[in-house]
Amino acid sequence: MDSIEFLDFCKKIKAIQPIGEVEYRQIVGRSYYCAYHKVKDKALSLGMPVDAYQGGTHITLTKTLESFKPASPKLKGIAFRLRDFHKRRILADYHLDMCISEVMAEEALRSCEKILEELSYFK
């Protein structure tokens, strides 16, 4: 499976009417995982040691991008975006007392697409 299918799935969910909070939560979570897997795949293809740091797989990936030598402002930007996106995914998946809105779902889709666009700069 290609992780872009997560983003495609999110777009299908968005097209369903009516749409509610459970769908918004799915959009946030699945679009995050599209971005996460694409970033991880790109890091591996660039020869980055994605498991070189202590911690969970998500934080380890962002640390790898931030500390890669030679330093890359573009990679650091992707790392910051992905870290912020991860926080929103945590809210959507685990904080059921918080309302996840259509605005948050739209922001998640835009974040995913922005990260994918930024990854395209790396061959």
Image: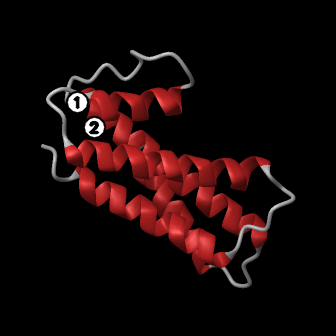
**Circle 2: residue type:** Lys
Query: Which residue is disc 2 drawn over?
Result: 42
User: Residue 56: in sight, yes or no?
Assistant: yes
Quadrant where the image shows the C terminus: top left
Tag 2, which secondary structure?
Answer: helix
| Snapshot quadrant of residue 23 | bottom right
Query: Which residue is disc 1 drawn over?
Result: 45
At horizontal 70% and vertical 74% (from top left) the residue drawn is 101
Quadrant where the image shows the N terminus: top left
Marks 2 and 1, how far apart at CA: 5 Å
Specify whether 68 is left or right of 107.
left
Specify whether 42 is left or right of 59.
left
At horizontal 20% and vertical 53% (from top left) the residue drawn is 120
- Near mark 1 (Cα within 10 A), the count class, few <14, some 14-19 or many ≥20, is few
Circles 2 and 1, Cβ within 8 Å, touching? The answer is yes
Tag 1, which secondary structure?
Answer: helix
**Circle 1: residue type:** Ser
At horizontal 31% and vertical 19% (from top left) the residue drawn is 49
The percent position of residue 72, horizontal first and vertical second, equals 19, 40
Q: Residue furthest bottom?
A: 17
**Foreground residue, 59 or 2?**
59
